[in-house]
Amino acid sequence: MAIIRTYRLDEKNELQFREAWYQQFDEDELGQFVINHGTVGHMSKTSDVQDVKVERADELFAGFLAACEEDGYAQIPAEQQSWVIVQYALKTKDGTERDRYMEKKAKEALTGHLAWRGLGTVESSDFAPNKLNIRILSPAPKLAVASVKVCVRDAKLDTTKMSVGIAPYDNIEAVKMAHPMPAKPFSLS
C-alpha cells in the first residue's frame, strides 16, 4: 500500500495534513483510493473512492499531488522530522513473552492512533537490556508525545513503566526525556 503524506501551516500557524493511499484487498482487481486530512494532532476526516483499478489510482494520485501543491501542501523530508521514542522498563534483561505481546499491542495502537492524527509513523522497535524502545518519526514531536500518552492509556497498556523522549532525526542518541517530568537521563541502550 503506497501512501503520500503532505503538510502545510495554515493562516493560524497550525500544521495541517493531507494523505492519500490506494489499497487492494486479497487478490481483488479493484481497490479503494482514500484521502485523509485534518489538523495535526486531531482526528482526521476521510473520504474514499471505491472500485478503483490500479491505472485509475495512478491518475487519482497525480490529481491529489497537483491539488496539494496548489493548496501549499508538501511532503516533509524525514531529515526535517524528529524521533519520538516510547520506552518501557522491563522486569528482565531480555524481556518476557508478555513484553513481546505488549510490544506488538503498543505498536498496533500507536500506528493507528498517530496516523489518523497526522502525527507520524511507527518506524521500528527493539529490546535493549531491560528496555523496549519504539521509534516514531514525527513532524510534530510535542503533539505526538501528548497523543502517545492518550493512546497508551486508551489501549490499557501500563503507563507507569513508560517514558517518552524526543531526538533530532540526525542524532537519535541525543534523546531528551519529554515524559514524565521532571526529566531524567534517557538512554536507548
Image: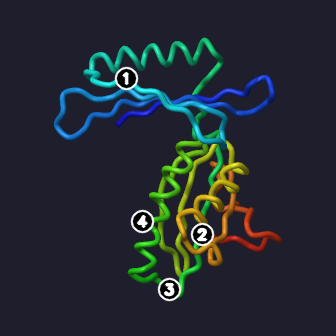
Q: CA distance from mark 2 to mark 1?
A: 38 Å
Q: Residue at x 73, y 66 (%)?
A: 179
Q: How are the residues colored?
A: rainbow
- 102 vs 6, left or right, is left
When asked about the image quadrant of residue 163, the answer is bottom right
Give the mark, 2 or 1, whose residue is nearer the N terminus: 1
Q: Earlier in the sequence, mark 3 or mark 1?
A: 1
Using the numbered discs, state the Cα–Cα distance from disc 1 to disc 4 in whole angstroms.
Answer: 31 Å
Q: Which residue is mark 3?
A: 93
Circle 3 sits in a helix, a strand or a loop, which is it? loop
Percent position (x, y) of residue 30?
Answer: 23, 26
Type of the residue with mark 4: Lys
Q: Visible in this render: residue 171? A: yes
Q: Is residue 155 left or right of residue 160?
A: left
| Residue at 27% in and 24% down | 51
Left or right relative to 26: residue 13: right
> First in sequence: mark 2 or mark 4?
2
Percent x, y for residue 150? 64, 59
Tell me how far mark 3 sits from mark 2, CA to CA. Answer: 14 Å
Q: Which residue is mark 1?
A: 49
Of the image marks 1 and 4, the number of the one nearer the N terminus: 1
Q: Which amino acid does the dot numbered 3 rest on?
A: Lys
Question: Which kind of residue does numbered mark 1 sit on?
Answer: Val
Tag 2: amino acid: Gln
Q: Kindly indicate whether the residue at mark 3 contacts the one at mark 4 (C-beta within 8 angstroms).
A: no
Mark toward the viewer: 4 or 3: 4
Q: Nearer the viewer, mark 2 or mark 4?
A: 4
Pointer 2 local density, CA inside 10 Å: few below 14, some 14–19, many at least 20: many
Residue 47 horizontal/vertical position (percent): 46, 27
How far is the residue under mark 3 from the one under mark 1? 48 Å
The residue identified by callout 4 is 104
Callout 1: few (<14), some (14-19), or many (20+) C-alpha neighbours within 10 Å? few
